[in-house]
Amino acid sequence: MTEQTYRAAGVDLDAAQAVKERIGAIVRPTHGPQVLGGVGGFGAMYQLAGYRDPVLVSSTDGVGTKLKLAIMMGRYDTIGEDLVNACVNDIIVSGARPLFFLDYLALAELEQPVVESLIQGMARACSEVGCALIGGETAQMPGLYARGDFDMAGFVVGAVERDQILDGSGIESGDVLIGLPSNGLHTNGYSLVRHVLGLDDDQSPLKEHVPELGGTLGDALLMPHPSYYGAVSDVLPLLKGMAHITGGGLVENVPRVLPEGVAARFDTSTWPVPPVFTFLQERSSIDPDEMYRVFNMGLGMVLVCEASVANDVVRQSPDARVVGEVFASTDGARVVL
């Protein structure tokens, strides 16, 4: 007779409990005095303090099909960082400071080393920006996910004083565009990469050493999505708006922060394009317009400020550089490259 237990159905409760105990040890160092209660409660509690007129800013995101690359390579040490930083970058464009982060992890079966690597990456990224990894959920879902597959999502909450919100409404013609460099694909465009390189059928290119990339193709593709909080936190009072360059590239993300009647003109000669993009284009003949529509092409964040303070912003933001300008648009154009 078949064993009639949850474990026989594919859900290992003992393993889940063991992982929960390990997770507690990993995330507690990210907690400060604002985190109330211990790990494992039904709900996480955070005491908001130190604000006059706070507005909460929240965002949720995943890491897309970059997960497929991590699974192909059996490397999970950076995916947790990707998840946290993709979310954090989405709220700092409003001027918010990240307060706490939650994660959701769904998998076919619970492999403790994999889960621990993912949580360790999240905790590392949270610690770097002073954000508490306050809670989460790890769900075993056999039958819904194939063996070895999983998905993950992150949820971040931050706060900003109401009178310090960056919404782009004050951006006008003559303002300056300042770019912060990306280190690669971040978390966008991986479905196109897998398609043009045929990685679903042949994963051997991931192990190929590519001199211009300084390592293997797999290493370049798994480069973790950085957080830009440290680079912008000191210059927030000088900014009028920011755009996180994710899926859709400059073409679709920059207009999200521009008011009507103005557009952004970028001089693409002013910043270096990471070698991984040149490699992909040469290997696959992707049209240049498609490259700029799918990938960040070297800019992970775009800041907008008055021309009079542009030098101050560049001086205080590591690796920042002037990459363009805002101009009055009469033909409906929003981004010109």
Image (cartoon, helix red, strand yellow):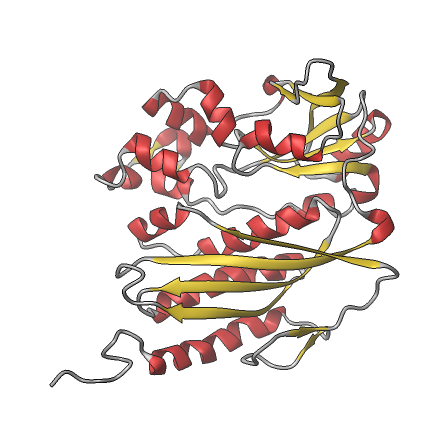
**Residue 68, relative to residue 202: is it above or below?**
below
Q: What residue is drawn where x is 41% and y is 76%?
A: 19
Q: Residue furthest left?
A: 1
Residue 202: x %, y % from top left: 22, 39
Please give left or right for residue 294 compared with residue 329 in the image: left
Please give left or right for residue 60 compared with residue 51 in the image: left
**Residue 14, relative to residue 161: is it above or below?**
below
* Quarter location, residue 314: top right
Residue 24: x %, y % from top left: 52, 77
Q: Nearer the viewer, residue 171 or 303?
A: 171
Q: What residue is drawn where x is 60% and y is 72%?
A: 29
Task: Inspect this view and state whether residue 157 appears.
Answer: yes
Task: Inspect this view and state whether residue 78 appears.
Answer: no
Residue 168: x %, y % from top left: 77, 36
Please give left or right for residue 266 compared with residue 247 in the image: right
Q: What residue is drawn where x is 36% and y is 54%?
A: 75
**Residue 46, relative to residue 96: is it above or below?**
below
* Quarter location, residue 305: top right
Q: What residue is drawn where x is 62% and y is 74%?
A: 44
**Residue 321, relative to residue 29: is it above or below?**
above
* Quarter location, residue 146: bottom left
Quarter of the picture holding the N terminus? bottom left
